[in-house]
């Protein structure tokens, strides 16, 4: 298939959907996704979305974000994210998203490394609530088309200008999609790891393509481990036990059923403490107890976690569950500015695949959905104000490069992992030098 469209969005998670909804209706938008439209990590987000509760909350929100990120955050990016958060929440509500309320007022929860309760939530399925409502709005827009099981394998570009996407469909056929702009919203890279909370198909392909096309990357060895996932010997994605659980009173125990750590430490520090305890215990997990929260509260506040654990043989209202760290989030990615522009003209990156340095070296809990939506909207605003038609004469694409797609997957994975290892050395040198 050869097709020309105004804008191509790669990915159908929260950032891609929100970007498309913020573009004018006179722009024809094609969204492609590697598997099904709802198989994004945005759907899996349990905890919630941060919001600035008022001017008095600004300093602590800012400091919490920087402290969790080891002060490697870009302060301008953090400021934009925090200042824009009330506007984003208003947008979500106008699109039908519902957040928990008590006595007619929004209920706020607290998670690790937050000094105050500033997180809005919908049960323990906030990501599903937000992404599902965004998708419902997308389906009403006649200018937006979604193609499932369509995998990006390259960009169409020349002279550092992007003019489309090369993609492979479910039958293995190569498709050329020309466009004025390309928006990369393809998610993280958890599929590269044996143990991850991410969907297995999220393998960071955009990073390999960026390396191939000499598009700037940043901090790609900054990969976050979540301290509490349900321990299992089964293969496949690890089930997340939300940080909100610990924010609302769950505690961690070692093999002797002794509490050994402050459960609300930043994720990287808590992960370190858990791993040290697992080594002492000669165990693959530690125990997490939710019992003090009360049976009815658990079932009401965390119905998804309660039900999943029940299916795995654990009743969290009565017993501890085994938890262990697993890869969770990618703080690095394709380098972008405050408008989500990459180093290549007419190419933007949003969501987890992008790096605007807002998270620093470690993401603060529940900043992910917020950051992805804030900078998705900024990308849409910037493109709308500065729209330029791209090249009408497409650059030559050698489709023979994509004949062996299995080998291409292997090559892409190798290039990403090699660059991550190389970046570790560079970052260590820079830190030592500083």
Image: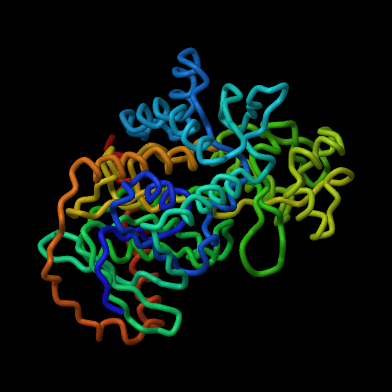
Q: Residue at x 74, y 31 (%)?
A: 249
Q: Position of residue 226 (x, y in %)?
A: 58, 47
Q: On the rendered structure, is 369 left or right of 348?
A: right
Residue located farthest toward the right when viewing the structure as drawn: 318
Classify the position of the C terminus by image quarter: top left
Asked if 373 appears above or below 128 in the picture, the reply is above
Q: Position of residue 296 (x, y in %)?
A: 86, 37
Q: On the rendered structure, is 64 left or right of 155?
A: right
Q: Position of residue 15 (x, y in %)?
A: 43, 48
* Front residue of 412 and 337: 337
Residue 425 visible? The answer is no
Classify the position of the N terminus by image quarter: bottom left
Q: Residue at x 31, y 55 (%)?
A: 183
Asked if 231 appears above or below 411 in the picture, the reply is above
Q: Residue at x 76, y 43 (%)?
A: 288
Residue 23 visible? The answer is yes
All told, the count of numbered labels is 0
Snapshot colouring: rainbow
Residue located farthest toward the top when viewing the structure as drawn: 56
Q: Position of residue 193 (x, y in %)?
A: 51, 63
Q: Residue at x 32, y 39 (%)?
A: 378
State which quadrant residue 5 falls in. Answer: bottom left
Asked if 193 appears above or below 322 in the picture, the reply is below
């Amino acid at each position: 298939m050869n097709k020309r469209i105004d804008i191509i969005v790669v990915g159908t998670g929260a950032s891609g959907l929100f970007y498309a909804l913020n573009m004018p209706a006179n722009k024809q938008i094609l969204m492609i996704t590697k598997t099904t439209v709802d198989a994004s990590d945005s759907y899996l987000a349990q905890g919630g979305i941060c919001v600035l509760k008022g001017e008095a909350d600004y300093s602590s929100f800012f400091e919490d974000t920087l402290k969790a990120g080891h002060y490697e955050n870009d302060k301008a990016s953090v400021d934009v994210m925090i200042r824009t958060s009330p506007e984003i929440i208003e947008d979500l509500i106008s699109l039908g998203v519902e957040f928990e309320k008590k006595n007619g007022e929004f209920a706020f929860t607290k998670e690790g490394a937050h000094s105050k309760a500033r997180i809005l939530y919908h049960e323990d399925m906030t990501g599903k609530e937000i992404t599902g409502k965004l998708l419902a709005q997308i389906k009403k827009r006649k200018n937006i088309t979604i193609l499932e099981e369509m995998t990006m394998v390259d960009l169409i570009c020349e002279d550092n200008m992007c003019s489309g996407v090369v993609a492979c469909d479910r039958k293995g056929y190569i498709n050329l999609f020309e466009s004025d702009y390309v928006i990369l919203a393809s998610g993280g890279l958890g599929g590269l790891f044996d143990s991850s909370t991410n969907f297995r198909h999220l393998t960071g392909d955009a990073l390999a393509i960026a390396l191939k096309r000499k598009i700037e990357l940043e901090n790609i060895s900054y990969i976050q481990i979540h301290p509490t996932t349900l321990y299992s010997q089964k293969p496949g994605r690890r089930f997340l036990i939300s940080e909100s659980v610990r924010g609302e009173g769950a505690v961690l125990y070692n093999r002797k059923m002794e509490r050994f750590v402050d459960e609300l430490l930043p994720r990287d520090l808590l992960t370190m403490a858990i791993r040290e305890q697992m080594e002492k215990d000669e165990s693959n997990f530690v125990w997490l107890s939710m019992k003090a929260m009360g049976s009815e509260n658990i079932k009401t506040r965390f119905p998804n976690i309660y039900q999943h654990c029940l299916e795995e043989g654990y009743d969290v209202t009565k017993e501890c569950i085994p938890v262990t760290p697993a890869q969770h989030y990618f703080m690095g990615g394709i380098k972008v500015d405050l408008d989500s522009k990459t180093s290549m003209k007419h190419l933007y990156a949003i969501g987890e695949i992008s790096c605007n340095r807002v998270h620093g070296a470690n993401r603060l809990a529940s900043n992910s959905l917020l950051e992805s939506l804030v900078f998705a909207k900024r990308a849409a605003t910037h493109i709308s104000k500065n729209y330029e038609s791209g090249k009408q004469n497409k650059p030559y694409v050698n489709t023979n490069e994509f004949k062996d797609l299995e080998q291409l997957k292997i090559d892409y994975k190798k290039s990403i992992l090699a660059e991550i290892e190389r970046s570790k050395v560079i970052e260590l040198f820079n830190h030592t030098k500083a």
